[in-house]
Image: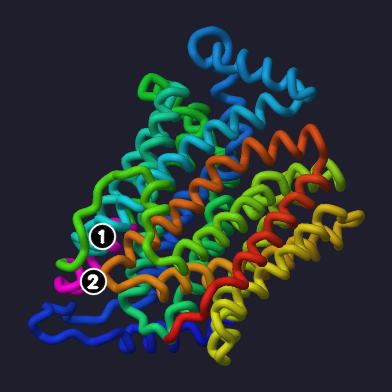
Amino acid sequence: MWSGLPTLFRHVSHSAPQTSPSAAAPARPLSLGVIFLTLYIDLIGFSIIFPLGPELLGYYLGEEGHGGLLGALLSRIDQVAVWLGNPTHLPVVLFGGIISSLFSILQFVFAPFWGGLSDRRGRRPILLMTVVGTAASYLLWALSGSFWIFLVARLLGGAFGGNLSVATAAVADVTDRAERAKAMGLVGAAFGLGLVTGPLIGAFSSRINLLDHFPGLAAWGVNPFTLPALIALALSLVNVVWIHRRFHETLSPEARGRSAEPRLRNPIRAILDLGNAAVRGVNLVNFTYQLAFVAMETSLVFLAAERFNYTARDNGLLMGFLGFCAIVTQGWLVRKTLGRGVPETTVLRLGLTASTAGFLVVGFAAAPWMLYLGVGLLALGGGFVSPASSGLISLYAKEEEQGRVLGIYRSLGSLARAVTPLFAGIIFWTVGSSTLYVVSAALVVVAFIGSRKLPQPHR
């Protein structure tokens, strides 16, 4: 599967447009392998917390859920859950959704800012800044004996979580137009591989509670989840060293000079102000699709547990299968498809078609094999949609606005993650899992209709 990746790394590294000596181009071209590893390390640390959600919430609710601000918040959430008719599951779903939404809202606000700032200052310094900020958030998490310190840590991590858009812009810098969408598939492969590795590390490391061996550390804020946080911190520090030593600047001084100074503006206004109709169109298509896909991500394990009595181990295998299929699709199948001249717009529509089928199969799955079939179709669809849409965004945009436009694109993905968990949880636990997946399939159909209006860019 991966045999062709080194060739692609070498090809796109040397196929980027050459600048004159006066442009002060990097002495050595940046390999896509460097960007791939940067993203992979970052996403491992980012996703370590994923399998810890219920236990984290249970720990803080048990420690501080009676009285005080947290207790007052929980009482309000309980009232909403009773009003919605499900006082058993919804309180935890709503509470977890609020925490997840706060993190994603910060990403939504800051992703365009970091992307635009990288257009002005260069990719390398902004990547270093955001990874250092992310490391600081993990340090706070490691010492978050209080829920409010943990909340500040998550908000800090969300604010600095813009390095994905910056690294994606670097991919656009070092590839020519013909290779752009295929290279974006590597971004998706790094994302998928990181989201497989990180949760596994988080699940195993969370079994070791440092307080069992060193109870005196509680005075420093050490908690049962400090070890996963320290691993995420260590990975971020490794990434800082890796970027400092191996990540050469990809944006020429000339391109930086043409970019306007970014301001932290209303992200919705930034989206509406996009003058390129094609960029607005693909953003809308991807946002609609992400609403459906995030609904699946936040509900799949609950569906498997409710319908097939899946244990944590069973769900881990299911999520691992999803990640593996995503890696195969984005790391190999997308490159083969685009390499044969299939237009990016066609790849996008193929992904949306497969996703629609996947949502319906999962929603009405009557046996585990049907669940796996539906998940495989969803991974195939997502593996096509992600690189095709990000590739189209990059091809539609000008050279000097790659960071800002890709930042807005990633920002909309964060907005989907901010609003979807709450609504998906409410639909799942009040109306039913099948209804949620039918609604998700309908959203993807809407995205497919919108994709038919997108022009195929000239390479």
Residue 90 relative to residue 172: left or right: right
Q: Residue at x 79, y 52 (%)?
A: 438
Instruction: Specify whether 2 is left or right of 89.
Output: left
Residue of label 1: 118
Q: Which residue is mark 2?
A: 251
Residue 39 visible in this rendered orientation of the protein: yes
Q: How far across and how far down the image is residue 116, in percent? A: 28, 57
Q: Which residues are magenta?
A: 239-256
The answer to which quarter of the image holds residue 142 is top left
Q: Is residue 346 left or right of residue 47?
A: right
Q: Residues within 10 Å of mark 1 (few under 14, many from 20)?
A: many
Which residue is painted at 77% across and 34% down in the image?
Answer: 429
Farthest residue toward the left? 22
Q: Residue at x 32, y 78 (%)?
A: 174
Task: Report x, y in % for residue 283.
Answer: 50, 60
The image quarter containing residue 239 is: bottom left
Placement of 6 over or under 239, stated as above or below: below
The picture places residue 390, in percent across and down from the top left corner, at 47, 68
Q: What is the C-alpha distance between the residues marked 1 and 2?
A: 9 Å
| Tag 1 near tag 2, CB within 8 Å | yes
- Residue 8 in magenta stretch: no
